[in-house]
Image (spheres, helix red, strand yellow):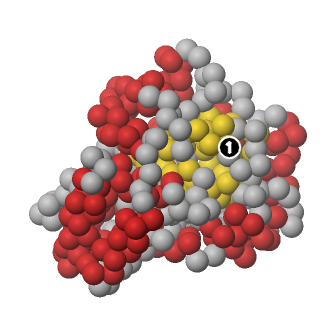
Amino acid sequence: MEKVRFGQTDLEVSIVVLGTWVTGGWLWGGADDKESIKTIHRALELGFNFIDTAPVYGFGKSEKVIGQALKEWGNRGDIVIATKCGLEWDEKENVRRNSSPQRIQYEVDQSLKRLGVDCIDLYQVHWPDTQTPFEATMQALQKLQESGKIRYIGLSNFSKEQISACLQAGPVHSLQPPYNIFEREAEKELLPFCMENGIATLGYGGLCRGLLTGKFTGDEQFAKGDLRRFDPKFKPDRFKQYLKAVDALKKLAAKYDKTVAQFALRWAIQQPGLTTVIAGARTPRQVEDNAGVSDWRITEEDIRKVDEILEKHIKTPVGPQFMAPR
């Protein structure tokens, strides 16, 4: 797996990050813990050294499973762990934003315990909390740095203006925005801004909730609790548009003897301003497919063809806004 310097940090990370929302099972129709651990181990064997998670992924479950996988692996070595803070939930699984210093201090200790580590490499505010001054949030994160509980500070789902406000209060080492072939809002302001300010980026949703794997036919019935039941992209009319685009992308990927998923991840990596791309995996086989992103390039001509495919097939594009918590 190719490695890259992560912004202005001293971290050398794999260009594909193992995403673990599915590991927690919540909003993904459940998860098999043993299979998840096998998947994490296979990723490490293949050279993935960057794992992204969050407490809200299964309400602690994803972090616990990663902690168990690391324990069984036996040697953390250069494995980089990124998790998040700033969301809280109740017994009914209602999630809301809370980036108060008190919440952050509570969360970091819980995450360290679940992950079984002494220090978190990258600690990210999951969603901006406009009820808490950004300065207060940043000060709390800097205190965690000084205490040795975290190494670097990241933001997720923040706008350019919100990042700027945080920068006035302290260093921001990374941003995690949604980004894939179908969701490209970050290209307008966020990626250029991050390039200008030396902020590393992790584009999440690299396979767009599975759309870019090419596995869907359009007849799928998603189980109760699966977030794709609420995703506008998976509603009948739009679903057909996106699947036509995926079919065309498959033909483009075949030129490189690659799957459409591998092509989609490689496309993301080649975009200006993107440092790494996050791809989830439920099974070892899926992570093996995601590993096929290294050591090849898409031509500029075919990069342009991607834009032509989107313009031809997707008449009513829609972003990932439905995922934003209160």
Quarter of the image containing the C terminus?
bottom right
Q: Quadrant of residue 25?
A: top left
Q: Is residue 261 visible?
A: no
Q: Secondary structure at mark 1?
A: strand
Q: Nearer the viewer, residue 131 or 292?
A: 292
* Residue 202 relative to residue 8: left or right: left
View extreme (left): residue? 219
Q: Amino acid at mark 1?
A: Arg
When the figure is inspected, residue 18 is found, relative to residue 173, above or below; the finding is: above
Q: Residue at x 68, y 46 (%)?
A: 6
* Residue 272 relative to residue 298: left or right: right
Residue 157 in the image: x percent, y percent?
59, 65
When the figure is inspected, residue 61 is found, relative to residue 75, above or below; the finding is: below
> Around disc 1, counting alpha carbons within 10 Å, would you say few (fewer than 14), some (14 to 19), or many (20 or more)?
some
When the figure is inspected, residue 165 is found, relative to residue 87, above or below; the finding is: below
Residue 76 in the image: x percent, y percent?
61, 22
Q: Residue at x 33, y 31 (%)?
A: 284
Q: Nearer the viewer, residue 273 or 87?
A: 273
Q: Nearer the viewer, residue 305 or 158?
A: 305
Residue 270 in the image: x percent, y percent?
51, 57
Q: Which residue is mark 1?
A: 5
Q: Nearer the viewer, residue 17 or 234?
A: 17
Q: Residue at x 14, y 61 (%)?
A: 217
Task: Count numbered badges in the picture.
Answer: 1
